[in-house]
Amino acid sequence: MSFNNVENKVNVTSEIGTLRRLLIHSPDSGLGKVVPSKAQDWLFEDIVHLDTIRRKEYDYYVKILLYFLDPGKIKGKLAHIDAESSNRSFFKPDSADFHNSDKVIELQVLLKDILKNKDIKLKIVASVCAIENCTYELQNELIALPEDQLAKTLICGSIDEERMIFAPIPNFIFTRDIGITINNFILLNKAAKQARARESVLSKYIFFNHEVFADYRNNIIEIPEHVHHFLLPDEENQDRKITLEGGDVMVVSKDHLVIGCSERTTLYACNQVVKTLFKKEVVKKVTVVKIPKKRDFMHIDTVFTQVKRNVWVMLGSLGRKSDAINVRVTEIIEEMKDIRKEDKTQIIQFKIENPLEPTYFEYLEDLLDDISRNDLGSTEETKFIYSGNNKFPYDAREQWTDSCNLVCIKEGVVLGYDRNDKTVEAFKENGFSAIHAHDLVQKLESGEIDTETITDTIILMPSAELSRARGGFHCMSMPILRENV
């Protein structure tokens, strides 16, 4: 696909501005090849059913995105698309009938585009083969593949249905983690787990070489390692490891970035990001939110995301609402007191004019309220919609299935999983409507609902299999263009 006739603008200044362009990756055949013995090594809690994820779940995500961002690609075609669902050609990036939207952009298409350049093709194959420890013979075989087949192989790990040559990268569907758009800069990640190393390599080549990002190559930021890190003993180097994933980075306003220090993003990475962004004057303020390093939370976008200027969804046990759970714990084990202190969310804010005099926030709600009022100019009361309606055990259960991991299509209109019933109740109690994706698609096609007039709504996405992959729609989107708030 050519993007030559498209205005390839890159700019994101908030989490809630109307979404105009994003990067996604539709579930590929690699997800269907995750085996139980390797699932956790590949960062999956379980094996998933690929056909269900595609037809009954992710395809609805693509439909919703197209209706909002690129309606010309889908409006009037729904009956035909659904009638042809047996082959799904509209949703398959290697198909001649693929939608090829330049607003809902498929990473596999971008990879295929840059592989047309022979020099880039040689470099990518060499880089991947070095990571995967391939033989020289296999490397030459990969170089000989046509670019569309090679792009698919580099992602799913198989040359064809019968021959799997290296591990898949099933987490590639979580495009948020490959990088983050900060104003008109792109901050590249440094994956925490070896299972995602190939994602980082492929993404780097795409950002530095595809025409979509041609005007912004000087604005692509890679996080530098510590000087002479390779001379440190392994144990000491491990302590200073620099890893960062996009789910731990939120652009909450033009001047303010929030970074999570979590299971996947290290304190040293946060330090390097703060210094780098201040040096380049990308933002004026960076807040570091340290959350417990637990698989339950993973990234900060699994415990809070923004819905409107003055509305946030979050996990109560990491904010003021934590007392209710702590009381239950300490009634059983008094010794949990010290652990409670370690597990408490810690928040520190740095400003470019004087980074050595930071500001501290005691509770997550205090930070989010400050963002709403002082960064986004909200004059309304800041509201918090809590996971599971803050009722035990639904709060923890629904956070596990990404009740807090929502993406804004426009302010007040978010996508979330249909299985998180108590959280949906909380949305309704706070004045929001809820509509299932199945119904919304039909009403958008018939004209009964218009994307311009829909407001204050949580769109409920089918979630039987997708939610088991441990990521929601915030994870499955990398916005590269939003309207300014």
Image: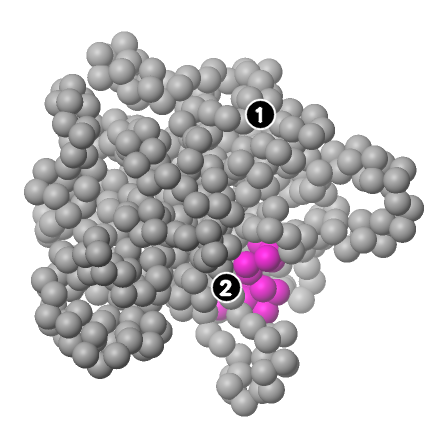
Residue 338 in which image quadrant? bottom right
Which of the labelled discs sits on residue 423, or is there none?
A: 1
Q: CA distance from mark 1 to mark 2?
A: 30 Å
Q: Residues within 10 Å of mark 1 (few under 14, many from 20)?
A: many
Residue 210 in which image quadrant? bottom left
Is 467 inside the magenta-drawn segment? no
Point out residue 363 in the picture as x, y percentages from the top left corner.
Answer: 72, 43
Residue 82 in which image quadrant? top left
Mark 1: secondary structure: helix
Q: Which residues are magenta?
A: 260-276
Q: Is residue 207 above or below residue 171?
A: below
Q: Quick one: 260 or 83, which is closer to the camera? A: 83
Which of the labelled discs sits on residue 192, or is there none?
A: 2
Q: Quick one: 258 or 144, which is closer to the camera? A: 144
Is 267 inside the magenta-drawn segment? yes
At 53% from the left and 79% from the top, the residue drawn is 226
At 29% from the left and 20% from the top, the residue drawn is 441
Point out residue 52 in the picture as x, y percentages from the top left corner.
Answer: 34, 33
Q: Is residue 212 above or below residue 58?
A: below
Three-letter code for the amino acid on which mark 2 is drawn: Ala
At 43% from the left and 31% from the top, the residue drawn is 463
Point out residue 371 in the picture as x, y percentages from the top left corner.
Answer: 58, 41
Choose the circle earlier in sequence order: 1 or 2: 2
